[in-house]
Amino acid sequence: MRRSLTYIFQAAFLTFSLQACASSQPAKIKPAITGASSTGVKSGKVQENPIRTGAEQTEKYLPYLKGKRIGMVVNPTSVIGNETSVDSLLKLGVNIVKIFGPEHGFRGNASAGIHVNDAIDAKTGIKAVSLYGKHSTPTKEDLADVDLMIFDIQDVGVRFYTYINTLQHVMEACAAENKEVLILDRPNPNGFYIDGPILDPKLVSGIGLQAIPIVHGLTVGEYAQMLNGEGWLKNKVKCKIKIITVENYNHDLPYDLPVKPSPNLNTQQSILLYPTLCLFEGTYLSQGRGTQFPFTVLGAPALKGKYDFSFTPKSIKGMAETPLHQNKACYGMDLRTYDVAKIRKDKALNLNWLIELYNAYPNKADFFNFKLSTQMGNFDKLSGDYGLKQQIIAGKSEKEIRASWEPGLSRYKTMRQQYLLYP
């Protein structure tokens, strides 16, 4: 993910074509927005004006950085062309004094949920402060030598994906110290729909901080505006933000990520299935962690005889060291070839998979029992709603479940409109 880039990359990235991740290894990837991607996602017709992320538009913000001591909230998705934005901006003479890393760390080599320690980045020699370790919010000391904070992280548009929580904590810390945050915006690969229950305030946790649905339909820049506008930051502070918007982007435009956003979202298929399949982390079913195709399969040993397809989770360093049902054959659904165009068409989470697999599970008392394994999550916190689990247990239909999300979901969609930066 970090390849050489010439000092004059500004001319080169004008023709840069975004690419899709095809495997869990750093890959040679096909162009993203010029037909079928390497993962089989139909990306539509060739775009006359290719997408340019905020980070790529250095001509719009380099002058603003001159003479300032810069902090950067970044990870491996923070790229300009084929190199990290940290490495690229250093070559352009930007004075980066500190790096802040979210879950998985700055270089992205930590597994999900694993705490990351502060360190000195081996490549640049810059101190890397972990925001997924001893503390999630930059301290006053962390920000003492920073004049301007840059936030440049690729999100996937889902409430329980923790990078938007990192954004909130950074904005709160910077507001308290009167520091500005420059957001280099990036497209949302799941930005074409909004779905799921609105988070119940009683279920606020590290995988859900604000009253938004599971699939929120916002870029990071738009969400930052919502945090400010709705008074959601701690003590209702307002953070001074500046956003470099994405060129030639709209929410309905298919977007294949140039690098995997986290170790277990390693294909475009997994990114599009993630909003639904991550809910299964609150069940006794494996979502494929411990395989090279996480978030594209579902299964459990107890479903043997119910389904023919099987897979066996193994320990994989940097992805899943102790996966659920490790070294046991899991039987269930293979969604690696599922036509994700249906998601674009339906613009909805697939509740039928939850309903079907719950009905198929022999010992229903185990299905949602997160006390059975430390590798399981709390389903209520994942869904953000006490009702969804009970509705599935009670045999409610998808239509009945969706009806219970109103009028909250419609109110959110209306509120969201005032913060949009893109059609």
Image: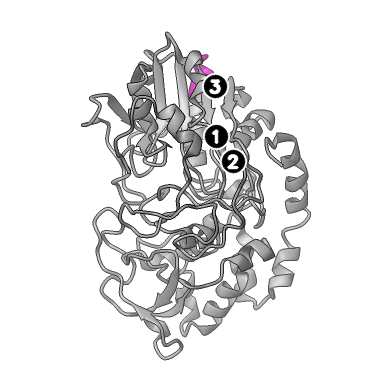
**Mark 2 is on which residue type?**
Thr
Circle 1 is placed at which residue position?
185
Rendered location of residue 358, percent (x, y): 53, 78
Q: Earlier in the sequence, mark 1 or mark 2?
A: 1
* Residue at the image position 40 percent from the left and 62 percent from the top: 376
Query: Could one spot residue 252 in this view of the protein?
Result: yes
Circle 3 is placed at which residue position?
60
- Are the residues tagged 3 and 2 within 8 Å (C-beta)? no
Q: Is residue 111 left or right of residue 37?
A: left
Query: Would you call the spot at circle 2 few (<14 residues within 10 Å), some (14-19), or many (20 or more)?
Result: many
Circle 2 is placed at which residue position?
219
Q: Is residue 264 magenta?
A: no
- Please tell me whether the stretch drawn in magenta is mainly helix, strand or loop: helix
**Mark 3 is on which residue type?**
Lys
Q: Earlier in the sequence, mark 1 or mark 3?
A: 3
Question: Start and end of the magenta stretch?
Answer: 173-178
Residue 56 vs residue 122, the one in the foreground? 56
* Residue at the image position 67 percent from the left and 53 percent from the top: 194
Rendered location of residue 71, percent (x, y): 40, 22
Q: Quadrant of the C terminus?
A: top right
